[in-house]
Structure formats: C-alpha cells, structure tokens
Image (cartoon, rainbow, N blue to C red):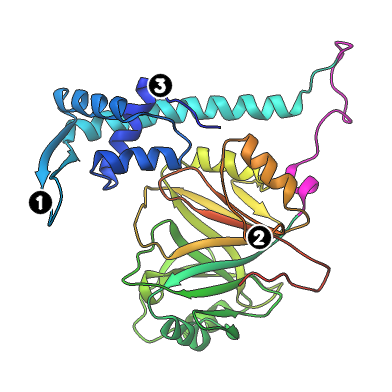
Amino acid sequence: MPLRPSRELLTAWLLVLVRAGVTYGYDMRRELAARQLEVDYASVYRMLRQLQRDGQLRSHWGKTVSGPRRRLYEITPAGRQALAEIADQLKAISRSHHAFLETYARTPERLDGGPPTSDDVPAPAAAQDGLLALDELALAVADPDAMVAFLREHVGMHELDRSGDWVLVGADRLATKLRLLAAEGPREPGALSRLVLGVADLQRAVMSLPSGTEMRQEGPGEFAFEGPEGLGLGFTLAPRGLDYDLDRVILRVAYPQEATVALTQLGCVARDGALYIAEKRIMLEELPAWTERPLLDHISVHVASVAPLAARARRGGLTVETADSDDTVTVVVPGLERISFRFVKLAAPGVPPNTS
C-alpha cells in the first residue's frame, strides 16, 4: 500500500536522493514511487524550490542532445548538514517503531484481559515459513571467466554449472554458491561489503592467495582482502563444516535498522547482532553505498512455502516483484541500495529448485 509521506519525510527523501546522484525531478518521483511513496509532481517541485530557497539545494540547467533542457539539482553543505540531522531523528524514530512492533508481535489481544500465555505468542517467521537455506548470491560481473579463475585457484571453489550468461561456483553443491551473471562493466561493490568464508586452516587459505594481495586483519582469526572487480572477501577460522563455505555476508546500507525490520519480517532471525538464515549470518554496516552498477544482483533463499512469505511482505509494505513462477518471489529491502532477496520453494528434500 503506497504511503503519502509527511513534509519532513519528503524533505529527507529528496535530499538523500540528490546526494545519491538522482538529480532530475522526474527521476526523483520515479524513485519515490519505486519505494511505495505516493507523491505528485507538484509537491516534489514545490519542495525542491523550498530547499533551494533554504540553501540546502542548488540547481542548474543541464545540457541535452535533444528535447527540452533539464533542471538538475545538487546538494549543498547546508543540505548535507540538514540531512545528517534528519537521519539522526529518523534513526531514533525507527528504534521506537521497531520496539513497538516487537512488543505488538509478542502481546496479542486477549478478550479475558489476562496476560498472554506462551500459546498466544506467534512463532518466529522462520519457523512459520521455513527459511531453509541461504542458497546463492548472484553477482553481476563484467568478466565471469576471470572471476571463476580467481575463485577456483585461490578461494577453494569449483565450477559447478554453466550456461550462456552465468556460471555457478562454490565449495560444494551443498554450500552457499555464487552465481556469476555476465553484465556490463565496470561494476562497483555497492551494498556488498564482504563475503566471509569459513576455512579449516587459516594459514593455508591466506598462503593460497596471489602474491602481493593486500590483507587486513578484522579480528582474531579473520582476514579480509579484495578479489576481482572490487569483490570484498574474507577468511575466518571455522574448523567445523565445509571448507570455504560462506560463513556470513556483510552488507552496507544507509539505514540498518530499517533493513533489519524488513529482513525479520521476511523470516530472518535476529540474534547476537546479526541476522540468521538457518546457520548463515547476514550482518549490516551503516554506510550508504548506492550505485547504478552493483556487484550484488540478488540473494537467493530456499523456503518451504512462498505464498505466506509474499503475503506478509506485502502487508509490511515491502516491494514484491512479479515472480517467474508460483514457486519464486523476489522482495526488495527498503533503501537506496534496493537489495533483492529471491525466495525459492524447495520442491523436495535433495531436489534443488530451478533458480537459473
């Protein structure tokens, strides 16, 4: 259901869109509509003019090859300061909203007025809908073959399957896999900060990297480095489990609290500062990372049932994209990063779904 934003929220959105490089009024309204915000053109342009008068935006006429000239906007230092103050206010509001929603979910209404019992508390979404596994991370890369060669030679992965425009790699078919999609380059990391792989022998893993690879230690028993096309990678000591399988994915988002609420609505379990899909962790860093050509295309998750998950996502105001089949649905996490999660019904134990 589209939301008509308040004057303050519209101000915040216009400033952050301009800062992210959305400089034309028509494009701003399109971006707002994509995020389920209902704003007419007149309101957008009135607010843009007001922000100019307040010194938070400035504009100029852009050059075009054909058609009418476009007025393009850029944010000023005063606008950046105002945006930072608005973001602090919204973070506080978001924390309050999250606390309310958690309390609401755990305290259902009782007709007898008595305190809720354990039978009244709904089961976690993951138990209801069955988030079975973080199956794949689909990466849009300019040179899939070069990426495959690096991952095979230095990061303990194998080529598992190949088609005309994608290659599937991973430590094993039972591991979380990488689907490398051929895409126009150059690519930028965007929301994908780092993929951390668990290894049984940390020293051996580090020694397998190309000579001259820049390493940084992220903590006891963990090192981070960069692969081809800016792909952030890391090794962490994990003596149990499959060698070179994904331990966790770290995502950069402008508003971690908003993303956390959305992901818990989808069935991720919040625990110990991370979000869990089965045993795999998703961690969020607070850092705006919008780009037009991100490495991360989508994250694919196996589920027991698609329909209830899609229904709950819609009730929560999340963007649900048209599915290719009744067994697949894609949900976009709120935020400029537009991180997509593709939920795929697992047909039967041991029989993987078609996620190509």
Q: Is residue 90 above or below residue 240?
A: above
Amino acid type, label 3? Ser
Q: Can residue 189 be seen from the camera position used here?
A: yes
Q: Position of residue 289 (x, y in %)?
A: 37, 52
Separation of marks 1 and 2 at Cα, in angstroms? 44 Å
Q: Which mark is residue 34?
A: none
Q: How many marks?
A: 3
Direction from residue 117 to residue 257 in the image, left or right: left
> Magenta stretch mostly in which secondary structure?
loop
Q: Which mark is residue 63?
A: 1
Residue at position x 64%, y 78% in the image: 243
Q: Earlier in the sequence, mark 1 or mark 3?
A: 3
Neighbour class for label 2 at 10 Å: few (<14), some, many (≥20)? many
Q: Quadrant of the C terminus?
A: bottom right
Q: Quadrant of the N terminus?
A: top right
Q: Can residue 224 be seen from the camera position used here?
A: no
The quarter holding residue 216 reads bottom left
Amino acid type, label 1? Lys
Residue receiving disc 3: 6
Q: Secondary structure at mark 2?
A: strand
Q: Position of residue 52 (x, y in %)?
A: 16, 28
Q: Which mark is residue 301?
A: 2
| Start-end of magenta stretch | 111-130
The quarter holding residue 260 reads top right
Q: Secondary structure at mark 3?
A: loop
Circles 1 and 3: CB atoms closer than 8 Å? no
Separation of marks 2 and 3 at Cα, in angstroms? 35 Å
Q: Position of residue 8 (x, y in %)?
A: 36, 22
Neighbour class for label 3 at 10 Å: few (<14), some, many (≥20)? few
Is 120 one of the magenta-colored residues?
yes
Which callout, 1 or 2, points to the residue nearer the camera? 1
